[in-house]
Image (tube, rainbow, N blue to C red):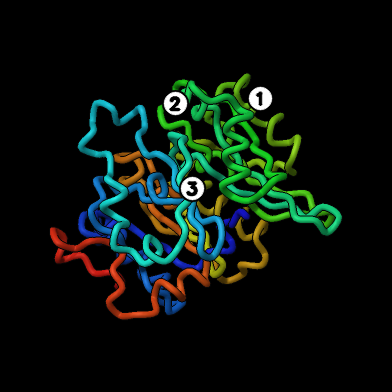
């Protein structure tokens, strides 16, 4: 099965992020504390982007792990996290099933969506064709079969978006945000296509509109960082939207989220992080590994459950 962001309840971060950016930590903690939520952290990461290398949750006790070996880090291998080291002492590594599939893929290139046509749930994952470039030995049909088998979704549909070669990472989590589905059960997505040239933007729109109601992010002006509004942190309890320091467009993005997600009334927030985004090229979805509620309960059963081996990170608590 697939699990969308609105079904998750625990947000897990790299300990490096909070060590290096205490002000951002305090902003995020301010929201999470109001929900009496623990903040999960993993250690031994080589960068902040836990979304990209941690396994994707497929069920309460099943995680799907891809190969984290991106082309853009081949000349910077010191930044490639040893995922085995991060998870080897975690409870799910011992008690839960990890499904490994032989695909080089970043988690930021996975956006899961659901529909409910004629009371039958439909599952989608949106990816760019960057996956094909990094896995030349596989064709689309082979990749689709691997996904269907790993997620136990025989009718899973992969929505392929063209990869703009000027976008090094080729991720979809700055392009598409799953909203929900309409009264007919057709999925709805919020998109930001303004940063792409007209031809690629049109191809993306056509691919998405074949399966989804496509809602475009409406801003009075577009910034090179306007994609970050799509790259938010979402759980079943709240949404936190990155702010990019533009008072007008920050307010416009916040307003549109409130209109699109009425079920989150009073639970949509914004944190300012323009300098971080400019420096590192990622935002809140990139920074978080999110987990469904029942898994969180299992994870938090004991006070000393390790999320990572702490031998050389003794200053890294599991939860704060």
In the rendered image, is residue 194 in sight?
Answer: yes
Q: Which residue is mark 2?
A: 134
Residue 281, x across and y down, in percent: 36, 39
Q: Nearer the viewer, mark 1 or mark 2?
A: 2
Q: Which residue is mark 3?
A: 231
**Inter-mark Cα distance, 1 to 2:** 21 Å
Whether label 1 touches label 3, CB < 8 Å:
no
Residue 273, x across and y down, in percent: 36, 51
What residue do we see at 27% from left, 45% from top? 82
Q: Earlier in the sequence, mark 1 or mark 3?
A: 1
Q: Which residue is mark 1?
A: 203
Viewer-proximal residue, 103 or 258?
103
Q: Earlier in the sequence, mark 1 or mark 2?
A: 2
> Badge 1: few (under 14), some or many (20 or more) residues near its Cα, within 10 Å?
few
What residue do we see at 42% from left, 63% from top? 11
- Look at the image and tell me in which quarter the N terminus lies: bottom right
Q: Horizontal placement of 22 versus 167: left or right?
A: left
Task: Reply above or below: 11 against 98.
Answer: below
Res 111 → quadrant: top right
Q: Secondary structure at mark 2?
A: helix
Whether label 3 touches label 2, CB < 8 Å:
no
Q: Secondary structure at mark 3?
A: loop
What residue do we see at 49% from left, 27% from top? 130
> Badge 3: few (under 14), some or many (20 or more) residues near its Cα, within 10 Å?
many
Q: Secondary structure at mark 1?
A: helix
Q: Horizontal placement of 154 versus 100: left or right?
A: right
């Amino acid at each position: 099965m697939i699990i969308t962001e609105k079904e998750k309840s625990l947000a897990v971060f790299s300990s490096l992020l909070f060590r290096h950016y205490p002000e951002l930590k305090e902003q995020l903690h301010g929201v999470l504390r109001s929900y009496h939520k623990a903040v999960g952290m993993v250690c031994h990461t080589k960068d902040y982007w836990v979304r990209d290398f941690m396994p994707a949750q497929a069920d309460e006790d099943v995680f799907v792990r891809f190969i984290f070996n991106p082309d853009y880090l081949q000349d910077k291998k010191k930044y490639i996290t040893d995922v085995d080291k991060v998870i080897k002492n975690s409870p799910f590594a011992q008690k839960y099933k990890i499904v490994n599939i032989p695909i080089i893929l970043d988690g930021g290139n996975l956006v899961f969506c659901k529909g409910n046509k004629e009371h039958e749930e439909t599952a989608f994952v949106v990816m760019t064709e960057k996956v094909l470039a990094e896995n030349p030995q596989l064709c689309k049909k082979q990749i689709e079969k691997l996904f269907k088998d790993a997620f136990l979704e025989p009718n899973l549909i992969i929505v392929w978006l063209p990869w703009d070669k000027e976008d090094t990472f080729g991720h979809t989590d700055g392009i598409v945000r799953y909203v929900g589905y309409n009264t007919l059960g057709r999925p709805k997505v919020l998109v930001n296509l303004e940063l792409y040239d007209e031809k690629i933007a049109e191809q993306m729109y056509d691919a998405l509109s074949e399966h989804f109601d496509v809602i475009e992010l409406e801003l009075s002006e577009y910034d090179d960082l306007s994609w970050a509004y799509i790259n938010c942190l979402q759980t079943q309890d709240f949404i936190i939207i990155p702010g990019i320091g533009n008072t007008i467009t920050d307010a416009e993005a916040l307003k549109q989220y409130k209109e699109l997600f009425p079920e989150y009334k009073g639970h949509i927030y914004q944190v300012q992080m323009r300098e971080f985004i400019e420096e590192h090229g990622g935002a809140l979805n990139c920074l978080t590994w999110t987990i469904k509620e029942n898994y969180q309960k299992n994870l938090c059963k004991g006070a000393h459950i390790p999320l990572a081996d702490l031998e050389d990170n003794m200053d890294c608590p599991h939860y704060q």
